[in-house]
Image: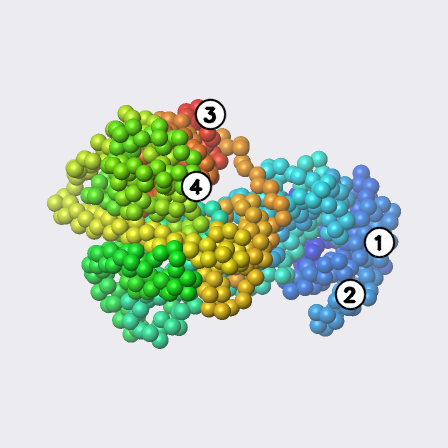
Amino acid sequence: MKIINTHNFKNAVIGQKAYNLFKAMEKGLPVPRLFAIDANGLKSKDMEHIVNKYLEENFPKSRLFSVRSAAIGEDGEENSFAGQFDTYLDVPVDKVVEKIKKCTESLSNERVESYLKHKKITEKLSMSVIVQEMIKGDMSGVMFTANPQGILNESVIIIGYGRGDGVVEEKVPVTSYYYNNTDKLYYYEKMEYSPVIDKKQVEKLISYGEELRDLFGEYLDIEFTIEDEKIYILQIRPITTIKNTKETILDNSNIVESYPGITLPLTQSFIEHAYYSVFKGVAYRCLKNKKLVEKYDPVFRQMVAGANGRVYYKISNWYTVLKFLPLSKKIIPIWQEMMGVSIKEHDVQKNDISIIQRIRVYFNVIYEAFRVQKGMEKLNANFNDVEKLFSDSFNKKLSNKELMKLYNKIGDAVLKNWDITLLNDIYSFVFTGLLKRKLKKLGKPNYEEETNNYISGIANIESMKPVREMVSLAKTAVDEGWIKKLESINSDEKIKELILQNKGDFTNRFNDFIKLYGDRTTEELKLETKTFRSSPKLLADKIIEYGKDIEKLNNLYNLLNKDDIKTGINTEGIGKRDKKIIHILAKKAMLGIKNREISRLNRSRIYGMVRSIFFSIGNNLVKEGLLKERNDIFYLRVEEIFAHINGGTYDFSSLVRERKRKYKGFEQLPPYSRLVFAGNEFDKTVKTANSEKNNSYNEKILTGTPCSNGEVTGEVIVIEDIGKDLDVRDKILVTKMTDPGWVFILTLSKGIIAEKGSLLSHTAIISRELKIPSIVGIKGVTEKLKNGDIIYMNGSTGEIRIESRA
């Protein structure tokens, strides 16, 4: 017989539990000293003598040990045998051999026999035993390198005071940490009297988990203890509850710009249908094969998904669709860059269509690509018909059946051609990406700055019209002495009354602004958002804000009303042929961006129409006694509302009450950018979540993607809640993302920095037109920079330098 240790474990007859610990020790991970006796050694007559001698020679100062089973088959991929065999803790040195024998005897206890029967295991078991130096941990726990519920990029740490058996057997209160491995963000749920460990310890545990996962190549269940702040690994086993099912990957790249933060069920269900209709329309347009389109219907139906009250792309389905396109291997990286997708890996498997069908698709796509801009011009021109249809049909006295009928009419009118906008997005992405790559290939050291120059100054870009009108409206308010009148009003009804009672240039322009741009506001694509149309007081407040600094207002007015605000483009050192190629690429990119901005403004108007319809339905449901207040409608899904209108029975009050409770829990969770599920996505159940921010960043230089040229130095304001009353004038805005409605805030700022975004995000497009420096794509910037920090930012290079801390 021989003792098994790190020198000879690889060829020994020992269970997986012992093997894993030896392997971790070999890699230098903090495993308490141990040895094992293999299955054959336990039968040796000399076992007692050899064990005692080994203890005396190798553990002279150790007083206590743990003696644990390491059965062959235990802690395997299929069966863990957790808790089936006997374990002995705090074993004195003179009792180690006795406990080894008892541990061996547990191989045939009733628990094990029952487990074998339940799991239908017929193989004969054999036992090896681990003897390990006992660590008197202050705290102990279990860490899972993937959430056993089925979230693969979320580690879970459960920790309590004392020994690990107290935690595993639920004898002590515990704190549970949920750590998103993609975003490095976590929250914890705490029981009364349970411990809280600091961020440093959490991240140390996570780093050990990552090392072990890389070492073993699978998701792991790891027992640990902490003594005097030092972490020890006690046990490592695979997570047997996670099966090799198809992963579902949710990613909020780009879509978070439209749907930041929590999005309520009405909006979620509306956009699920809208994305389905648009993608299915694109599929018919490009595939021209009804049978093939229907085959992929489940994919088109799930282009977006919701989890924990937030909106995500079901990104694997996007790749499925993109792989239909010609040169998809070239297009996908450009699409990823323009969409701001940070994790580039994806399933490389092609769609299962025949070569002949693929050739047809290629020809169809190329044909459609040449018609994209004509299609966009037609779509934009026909939008007036949609607006007329709505204005002629809608009034607040319509019944719910009539409102549902109008909703379907608007949907049919819009969605029959709206899929062209998706092709235009790809068109814009591709030509902007090709322009950027061409400049880089020509050796331009400042190719990103040059790209920004080429695609800025788009004549009369649609996104600038609302802000141009807003500035003119504010200037009129100042000139006609309206600012003080507006400041004295504190409700929507009184603003409406004031505007109605006073006829003149300002009131006419006020009403015209709401008619044309009343739906353009921050978070405008959430149906639950207050807009200038639904709350005119918001418009009055914005006018007051612009009117506070008359000098800046006049400068802004002059800037926005110049005939040509295009920056000069440096073509020095570029040959004639390359100049022509660059000119063609830039022209096509700018045309795509221009039409994209037109359709996005029209999209906000469509959401305004839908918002008005559901406001009216909500009012009707209140009158029927089915809802307490109109805004409760946002907690219902479209299909539930229409099913009720068609005669279905729902307890809306209970449904709203339960969803309000759930969504209150979701608000406590960190804003994860990516979630990877083993199987279908699901919502978490949240009790009381405590988030922890990192306040220990020491970086002085940060770098992101430059989107709008220029250099400024100024004071930082970090914006986490756009709904709060914020003084952004002459400050550098730092945020997670922006959306189209931010245009009114950007005009007052010195610069803009965002965690999310790309060269074609709204942050980039609007800041270029306003000549405000912008940088996007800096992970964690809302934590790395604080209110009052003084920073220098260079929108041409993407560099941010922290000059002084608040």
Indicate which label's residue lies in the foreground, 1 or 2: 2
- Evaluate if marks 3 and 2 touch, with contact meaning CB atoms under 8 Å apart: no
Residue under label 1, please give it: 99
Q: Secondary structure at mark 3?
A: loop
Label 2: how many residues lie within 10 Å, few (<14), some (14-19) or many (20+)?
some
Examine the image and state in which quarter residue 44 appears. Answer: bottom right
At label 4, counting other C-alpha atoms closer than 10 Å, the crowd grade (few under 14, some 14-19, many 20 or more) is many
Q: Amino acid at mark 2?
A: Val
Residue 805: numbered disc: 3
The circle drawn on residue 736 is 4
Residue 111 coordinates in the image, percent (x, y): 79, 64
Dot 1 or dot 4: first in sequence order is 1
* Residue type, mark 1 in image: Lys
Q: Give, as a three-letter code, the residue at label 4.
A: Lys
Mark 4 or 2, nearer chain start? 2
Q: Nearest the camera: 341 or 689?
A: 689
| 480 relative to 564 in the view: left or right | right
Choose the circle earlier in sequence order: 3 or 4: 4
